[in-house]
Image: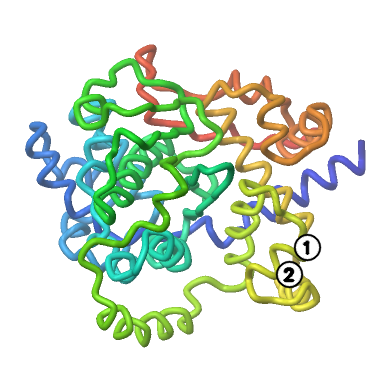
Amino acid sequence: MICNTRRIGRYLQMSSEMPLSCGRQRVGFLALLPTLLRRLGADAGDALMQAGLAPDSLDDPTKFVPFKSAAELLVASARLTDCQQFGFMLGEQIRPQMLGLAGELMCNAPTLGAALRDFNSMQYTNSTSSVSYLIVTGGQAMLGFSVVERDVDGVAYVYDTAAVAALNIVCSLTGADQSHATLSISHDEPRDLTELRHKFTGPVIFNADATGVMFPASWLTLPVRGADVSQRKGLQDRVNATRRSDVLGPLARFRREVWVALMCGNFHASEVAERMGYSKRLLQRHLHEAGTTYSEVLDQTRCEMASQLLANTMISFSSISLLLRYSEQSVFSRSFRLWTGVTPLEFRRRRLVLNSDRQYVRTRAPDLVAAH
C-alpha cells in the first residue's frame, strides 16, 4: 500500500505540472458567438462575464483566450439560451476559412486527404488543449477530435461543436454529400435533437469512444474545390516560421501524440518518437529533461481519456479498457484506482450533471483522492 500511495502522489504531482493545464484557444470561430446569442435572445456580454472573459475578448479572431474559458463560454451560452443544442448550432457555422493558417492550408490543398493531414499538423495553432487526427481503416476514414486538457467544464459542448464542424469542413472542401457521413460524439444522447436533425439527417452515434466525423475513405482522394496551388506554396514560409516558434515544446507535443497513438493503437515509445521525427533516444532525453518518463505520460493520458469517457458516456468498462489498450478489464480497474483513489464505477457515479434534463454543462471529474 505504501508503494501505491507513493505512485498516486507522484501521479498527482505530475498532473499538476502538466503544461496543457493552461492551454489556449484561438478566437477564430468563437467570433460567431455574439450574433448567434443575439439570435437566440441572449447577450454575449453576459456569457463572456460568466466565462471570466473581458467584453472585447471575441473582437479579434486572431487573438487567443484560455481554452478553459472558451469551454466555459459555451456552457454559459447554452445556459443563457436554455439551448442544449448550442454546440451543434455553433459547429454548423464553422468553415475552414475561420481556422487561421491551418484553414488556409486546407483550402489550398490538392485533395481532402492532404488537407486533413495539413490541418492535423497545424491544429495546435488553433488550440493547444485539443488534438485532431485522421484514422483510416477498412474503407472508412475518421477525422477525430479530443480535448487533452484536464478538468475542463463543458467538454460535451466542445465535442458537439467539433463533430459538426468536422462534418462541415470535410463536405465544404469537397462538396461531398453529408448524408453519406456519420457523426460520432463522446457523450450521452441529449433529449432534444431537433436542431441537429434539422441540419443533418445522416447517422449519429452517441456514447461513442471518439468524437468526429466518419466518411468513406475514398473521399480522401477528392479534389479540394477552389484550391490554389500557387497560394499554397506562398503559405509555406508562414508554416515554417510557425513551426519554428515552438508554441508546443517537445513534452507538450509528446502528450498530444500519445493521445492520438492510443486512439490509433500504435502507442509504443518508438512508434510515437518516429511520428514526431525523433529517435527513441532523443525522445527519452527530452522526457528526462522534463522530469518524466514515457510510462508516466502514458498513465496520465490513459487517466484523462478514461475520466472523460466515464464522466460523459455510458460506455462499458470493458470497452474503455480496450480503448486504452489494456489486455484485461481488471488491469484497467486497478490502474484507474491507483491513479484516482476511486474505482471506475465510483468515479462514474460521482459525475456531475446540473439537472435531470441531462443538460451536460458541467463534467468536471471529482477531485482526485489519494488513499491514505
| Badge number at residue 287 | 2
Which residue lies most toward the right here? Answer: 2
Q: Position of residue 165 (x, y in %)?
A: 31, 46
Q: In the image shown, does 265 or 344 lie closer to the viewer?
A: 265
Which residue is pictured at 59% across the width and 24% down the height?
315
Q: Position of residue 168 (x, y in %)?
A: 28, 46
Which residue is pictured at 42% across the width and 67% down the height?
118
Secondary element under disc 2, as helix, strand or loop, is helix
In the rendered view, would you say 136 is above or below 112? above
Q: Is residue 358 left or right of residue 12?
A: left
Q: What amino acid is labelled 1 in the image?
A: Thr
Q: Quadrant of the N terminus?
A: top right
Q: Quadrant of residue 46?
A: top left
Residue topped by disc 1:
293
Q: Is residue 149 left or right of residue 190?
A: right
Q: Position of residue 257 (x, y in %)?
A: 61, 60
Which residue is pictured at 33% across the width and 15% down the height?
191
Q: CA distance from mark 2 to mark 1?
A: 6 Å
Q: Report if the CB atoms under discs 2 and 1 are less than 8 Å apart.
A: yes
Secondary element under disc 1, as helix, strand or loop, is loop
